[in-house]
Image (tube, grey):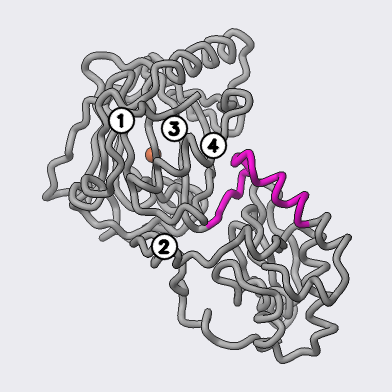
Amino acid sequence: MNIFAPTQSRTTEAYDKQGYVHLSGGVDPEFLAYCNAFLDAAMAERRALDNFAFKSKKEQYLFEFPEGMDIEQALMRPVSELTGLDLSRLTLCERHIKVYTEDASELPPPHKDRLASEVAMAVPLSVPAESRLALYPEACQKVNPYNTTAEWKQHMPEPETPEQVLRNYQPTLLDIRPGDIAMFPGSSVFHERLKPAHTRILYLKMNALGLDGLGEDPRTAHRLKASQLLEESTDDADLRRLTVDLSPRLEQLTVGHSRDSWQALYYAHIGAEGARPLRRCDFLLLKSLQGPQAVELLLAQARRSEAEMLRRVRRLAREGLLLLAPPAQAAPASASGSAGAKAAAAPRDADAKKPLAA
Ligand SMILES: [Fe+2]
């Protein structure tokens, strides 16, 4: 089964030019029928996600892909071709069907999704005639760096609130009907669904950061399991030749300060698990990784002995904070030459280029 109708052209022109893409009749009818049947069954069995219940707004259901679907071919490849995001890094971070309730607010304030929603793909299942998706692709496109929209709103300086930023902008109103697909940069473009009551819509959210904090990409659990098996079955000589990357589940690294002399405390944040204490040297090792790289390159950059670094790489892989893979499965992100590939390959902060202090 396909997700996209085969007749759709696959270029990044619309996404680059408009800041979004609306594919009229873009869904494969078989997939649309599957989604509707899936949601009917999920609602009948009351399988709504408790963690994502928005008061007086919408229910969310975790979507399951059709059995045997190759999501790399059916989803990731077309999305990469339409958005320019690097296919080798493209990761699903959310697959929810949203059902807006009767009492959903008619004109909710625009928002930006969490960081991992670099591209939000909407597949409407049913939409009332008057409902529209409002996008502001020309307004400030600063990325929401937080892992939730709520956290972003809490820390938002006054000049960056939607009321201030959007004062002089008119929204682009998209009338996306069942059978269509829309894609837009969820974490950087203000958006909202207007008059949403009774709308049912599948959202698939993706990024080229390799980030899947919730573990909703069906490949994430397999990759982590394969990584742990590799660690167990590989001697140090072979481990050097593997590729190492951050775990898709690792959402954030933070530093706290204890009331005991304000000594620094280091943490890793994995999805809903919360903060996990880290040693400083492991914090620095994780922070130095900006994408997949050969283990031996990591060893060459380190100031510690190779034996110690290999022990740490092994431990962090066992703990699910690092991902080990055969070199061929994690090619450098620059191969496609796309804008997304360039973005994915670029260091995200100045510290990234510094050698390990550990
Ligand atoms: Fe959103």
Name the residue type under label 4.
Ile
Q: Which mark is residue 251?
A: none
> Mark 3, residues whose alpha carbon is within 10 Å: few (<14), some, or many (≥20)?
many
> Mark 1, residues whose alpha carbon is within 10 Å: few (<14), some, or many (≥20)?
many
- Among numbered discs 4 and 2, the one appearing first in the sequence: 4
Name the residue type under label 3.
Tyr
Q: Can residue 258 be seen in this view?
A: no
Residue interval drawn in magenta:
210-227
Residue 108, position as x, y percentages in the image: 30, 33
Beta carbon at label 1 within 8 Å of ligand 1: no
Circle 2 residue: 341
Depth check, mark 3 against mark 2: the one in front is 2
Q: Is residue 253 magenta?
A: no
Residue 220, position as x, y percentages in the image: 65, 46
> Mark 2, residues whose alpha carbon is within 10 Å: few (<14), some, or many (≥20)?
many
Name the residue type under label 1.
Arg
Residue 239, position as x, y percentages in the image: 79, 71
Q: Which mark is residue 71?
A: 4
Circle 3 residue: 203
- Among numbered discs 4 and 3, the one appearing first in the sequence: 4
Is label 2 in contact with label 1 (beta carbons under 8 Å)?
Answer: no
Q: Determine the image quadrant of residue 341.
A: bottom left
Beta carbon at label 2 within 8 Å of ligand 1: no
Q: Residue 193 carries which label?
A: 1
Secondary-structure class at tag 1:
strand
- Among numbered discs 2 and 1, the one appearing first in the sequence: 1
Q: In the picture provided, is 314 more to the left or to the right than 182?
A: right
Depth check, mark 2 against mark 1: the one in front is 2
